[in-house]
Image (tube, grey):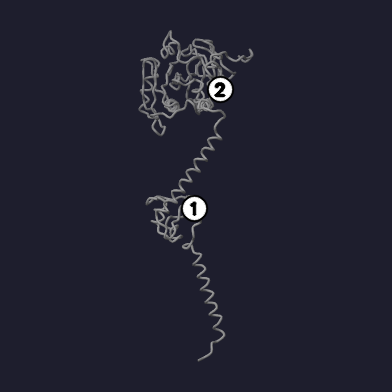
Amino acid sequence: MEPTSSSSRPSRLRCALAALAAAFLLSAAPGTAVAEDGQHTVYAGQTLGKIAKRYRITVDALREANGLKRGQRIHPGLVLVIPERGEPAARAKGRAAALRDERERSRGASAKERDAGARPPGKGSTKRDGAMPPNKRYAQRPKRPGWVRLVRGAERLDIQLLTPKGRLVPKALPKLSRLMRASPTASIPIDPRLATLIGMVSDHFGGRPLRVVSGYRPYSPTQYTPHSNHNHGRAIDFMVEGVPNTVVRDFCRGFRNAGVGYYPNSTFVHLDVRSDKVYWVDYSGPGEPPRYAGAKGSVAADEAARDVPVSAEEEVYGSGEPRATPPQPMNTTGTNSDTARSGSEKEKVLGSVSPTPAPETSPAKR
């Protein structure tokens, strides 16, 4: 028998080392991973199949333990219970249920902490409601989005002006134009952009009825503003039932390329469509010469209060009866601070029937 050569010994040693390295790599392979605390947190790119293969369990066992349905997707951050070998399915389900309950309790506690941090000081829902800005307090989700209820005297019109996606319904324009006519024989098509804004106002305030005071008015040499958009079917004077005019005014001021007029001593808000965005205040009452706030008021204004016929307001509110909306407090800033006052405070500001005075200006600015 020939003696073993010394050169063959290193080769055997190398084979032994390679076998040990292979055994080490197999022991560290994903398929033999052990779940920490019996749980696994899903990260991006993982599937149930990959996770099951990693822990050497079946996909069905993983799905059953965590209450997952076939085809139900998993997402990064989801914590799964990994069934142990030989562990009864009921026990794994119990661990998964306990994990879900713990997560729900943690979510509930976090939500309460957020609410407590956002809640204004004081107890009771009344104080919390009072702290809500008026423009949000009167905003409601409409039962029928896009549908508008218009009231003008004895006329009523329920019509869909906007689609569910907020687009104008063109076939509604003839009926709207008829309601906003100046007289039975004086009518022109209403501007489609104005019709769209009317629908948006209605939706914002929950579909409350809009009372139309004035729509289209033919040109008259006696009107104060010769460039009135009322003459072209691009303007409306109206109020929203149950909503202060200051709140309606502030919402309308958010429209682009629109004119908004506020008349504290009348019963309506003016809205028109144009190529720019303007706002004005007129402290005059029905039939009185205009008293604009600021030097730019007369330039921006689309109409004076006296341009609106008294009969138009009487048609809405009736003659000889108290009007539905009293004169508004003197608030031209758009903050709505007056609408949050209590009833007694409003009486101090408004008085019984006294009009809102215009701010004092020097003779040069009048």
Q: Quadrant of residue 47?
A: bottom left
**Could you say where residue 168 lies in the image, as x and y percent from the top left?**
40, 30
User: How far across and down, in percent of the image, does residue 313 sit?
Assistant: 44, 13
**Closer to us: 362 or 350:** 350
Name the image quarter holding residue 187: top left
Q: Tell me the residue at 50%/70% (across/down).
A: 23
Upstream in sequence: badge 1 or badge 2: 1
- Point out the image quarter for the C terminus: top right
- Residue furthest bottom as drawn: 1
- Disc 1 and disc 2 in contact, CB within 8 angstroms: no
Position above or below: 35 against 224: below
Q: Neighbour class for label 1 at 10 Å: few (<14), some, many (≥20)?
A: some
What is the distance, in whole Å, between disc 1 and disc 2 at their CAs? Answer: 51 Å
Q: Residue at x 51, y 40 (%)?
A: 109
| Rendered image: mark on residue 41 | 1
In the rendered view, tell whether residue 340 sits above or below residue 47. above
- Left or right: where 160 falls relative to 285: left
Q: Secondary structure at mark 2?
A: helix
Few, some or many C-alpha atoms within 10 Å of disc 2 (few <14, some 14-19, many ≥20)? Answer: few
Q: Nearer the viewer, mark 1 or mark 2?
A: 1
Give the amino acid type for the residue marked by disc 1 in the picture. Thr
The image position of residue 236, as x and y in percent, is 45, 20
Give the x, y percent position of residue 112.
Answer: 52, 37
Please tell me whether mark 1 sits on a helix, a strand or a loop: strand
How many badges with numbers are in the image?
2
Residue nearer the viewer, 354 or 164:
354
Relative to the observer, which residue lies in front, 310 or 101?
101
Query: Which label sits on residue 337?
Result: 2
Q: Mark 2: which amino acid?
A: Ser
